[in-house]
Amino acid sequence: MVDILAFLSRDFHFIAGLGTGVLSASLLQPADLLKTRVQQSGSASLVQSFKNIVKGPNSLRQLWRGTLPSIIRTGFGSALYFTTLNTLRQNVARSKILTSSGTVSVLRGDATYSSSSLPQLSNLANLTTGAIARASAGLIMMPITVIKVRYESNLYSYKSIWNAGAAIFNTEGVRGFFSGFGATALRDAPYAGLYVLFYEQSKRRLSRLHDVAPLDGIVPAKMASSASASINFGSGVLAAGLATAITNPFDAVKTRLQLMPEKYGNLVKASQQMVREDGFRSFFDGLGLRIGRKAISSAMAWTLYEELVRRADVRWNKPEAAL
């Protein structure tokens, strides 16, 4: 049988990542906007931030303010991330250095069941490949990330993303497009690494709990698509919740640096100033919103991505099986 992941082109993974990223960004933009408003000042609560938005003109439209830069960032960021991650995981799987048989599969009789369509790697490989892929994509998408955060904030009155980009360049130069990159990298790389690690581990454990019923006395050779999708989505929610809680302090610092770089300066100075002004609780501002958004967006993106790979696997391997 052909190994579909070895033959699928990079275009497939790029398009799959782009589609899932655009969908999640479009649906969940209000949560992202509210998170930015809460984190920009430790004194603003979620309820107060929401009230301030809805009491203004065009309240519904304001909840989706910044959707275009968010779609560009999340869409192309996801496309780059999944493409890079697939390449890294394929190379590691072929090298057999950090692979781990049975990581996400369950043996039942003569059949092997798994909710995963991806290579089986060790915990260290999952952690490392996820971190490297996310850090690489984050660096490339950093300029649009800064524009997105400032456009969502009410500290700036940009009329368009083009106006925002021009204003940042005129006042801060190229350096302004990379404000908060250190905090962003410290958030994204550990988050992605931990996410892939927790995600794969959760799939393995949930797959063990899946009860396979024989059909006409025959045990199915593969886990049903609905079952694998449920396991993958549940695993995505759990993984995102854990990884988000661990990395939220860096997200809070990142937002302050990107909104007010002249005030907060760098990662260390920003952290110290946040503690002095708002206490340690400021590192967890927006945590509930971020967990909710990340849980849904990550679970949705990974479930759809794996389902696309699984369907391509079935379609591409069907002629091979008939030979």
Image (cartoon, rainbow, N blue to C red):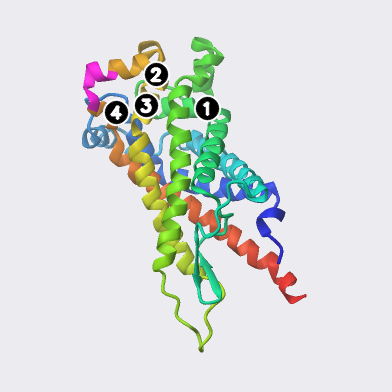
- Residue 246: x and y, percent? 35, 37
Q: Which residue is mark 3?
A: 153
Q: CA distance from mark 1 to mark 4?
A: 21 Å
Q: Are marks 4 and 3 in contact (CB under 8 Å)?
A: no
Q: Which residue is mark 1?
A: 142
Along the polypeptide, which appears first: circle 2 or circle 3?
3
Q: CA distance from mark 2 to mark 3?
A: 20 Å
Q: Which residue is mark 4?
A: 283
Q: Amino acid at mark 2?
A: Leu
Residue plotted at (50% across, 85% down): 215
Along the polypeptide, which appears first: circle 2 or circle 4?
2
Q: CA distance from mark 3 to mark 1?
A: 17 Å
Q: Residues within 10 Å of mark 4 (few under 14, many from 20)?
A: many
Residue plotted at (48% across, 65% down): 228
Q: Amino acid at mark 1?
A: Met
Residue lying at the far right in this picture: please name it: 323
Q: Amino acid at mark 4?
A: Phe
Q: Residues within 10 Å of mark 1 (few under 14, many from 20)?
A: many
- Residue 183: x and y, percent? 43, 25
Part of the protein shown in magenta: 274-280
- Of the numbered discs in the image, which one, if any, rests on residue 267? 2
Along the polypeptide, which appears first: circle 2 or circle 1?
1
Q: Nearer the viewer, mark 2 or mark 3?
A: 2
Seen from the viewer's position, the closer of residues 55 and 144 is: 144
Along the polypeptide, which appears first: circle 3 or circle 1?
1
